[in-house]
């Protein structure tokens, strides 16, 4: 069967992360500049191969000072490591899982995320689209994102757990 390429429609997609702040609330951030592609056999996503790249310099948490801190040496070191990348090793639509290798700060680790395929549909201009939701949790210290501060009441300023969620739409290449 012929390989089909699907490219990310960034205007109908978002990639978010959440971390616990002060151990009492979540701070949400996003990567507005992302690229992704899925290669499938025909339109069979169960054997798809996913690749994803986020431009870390685009990270936003709606706080300029915090965004600058995230881009610096304490976290992402965007001067040395300007992207986060993911390459799938398997996409299991039936069981709702995507497995692959996540690279942050030059460190590559395997991850398994929940993935929900929402199907395909044609937009008003005849473009075939496919929709997915992806979610999961990683430990930021696994990628050398170690900065933290102890709180005088106990605990830490930023949780180790990072929740990831994405709602993404792909368009079938002509």
Image (cartoon, grey):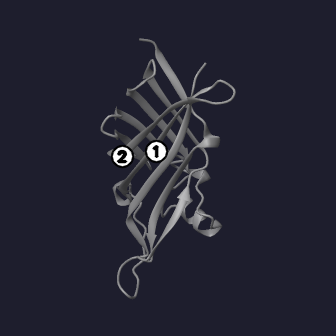
Tell me the distance, in whole angstroms, between the alpha carbons under discs 1 and 2: 10 Å
For the view shown, which residue lies furthest in the right direction? 125
Label placed on residue 113? 2
Residue at x 63% of width, y 25% of height: 127
Query: Residue 105 placed where, x, y %?
Result: 44, 50
Query: Residue 119 placed where, x, y %?
Result: 47, 33
Quadrant holding the C terminus: top right
* Mark 1 neighbour density, 10 Å: few (under 14) some (14–19) many (20 or more): some
Residue at x 45% of width, y 17% of height: 42
The mark nearer the N terminus, 1 or 2, is 2
* Mark 2 neighbour density, 10 Å: few (under 14) some (14–19) many (20 or more): some
Residue at x 36% of width, y 46% of height: 114
Is residue 21 toward the left or the right of residue 123 in the image? Answer: left
Is residue 39 toward the left or the right of residue 92 in the image? Answer: right
In which quarter of the view is residue 30 placed? Answer: bottom right
Q: Which residue is mark 1?
A: 133
Is residue 155 toward the left or the right of residue 36 in the image? Answer: left
Quadrant holding the N terminus: top left
């Amino acid at each position: 069967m012929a390989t089909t390429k699907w490219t990310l429609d960034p205007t109908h997609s978002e990639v978010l992360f959440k971390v616990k702040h002060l151990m009492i609330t979540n701070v949400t951030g996003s990567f507005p500049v992302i690229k992704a592609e899925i290669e499938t056999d025909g339109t069979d996503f169960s054997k798809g191969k996913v690749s994803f790249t986020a431009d870390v310099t685009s990270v936003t948490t709606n706080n300029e000072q915090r965004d600058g801190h995230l881009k610096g040496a304490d976290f992402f070191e965007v001067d040395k490591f300007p992207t986060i990348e993911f390459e799938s090793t398997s996409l299991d639509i039936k069981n709702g899982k995507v497995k692959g290798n996540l690279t942050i700060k030059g460190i590559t680790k395997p991850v398994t995320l929940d993935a929900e395929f929402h199907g395909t549909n044609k937009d008003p201009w005849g473009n075939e689209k496919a929709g997915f939701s992806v979610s999961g949790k990683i430990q930021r210290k696994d990628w050398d994102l170690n900065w933290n501060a102890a709180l005088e009441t106990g605990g830490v300023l930023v949780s180790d757990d990072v929740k990831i969620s994405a709602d993404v739409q792909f368009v079938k290449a002509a």
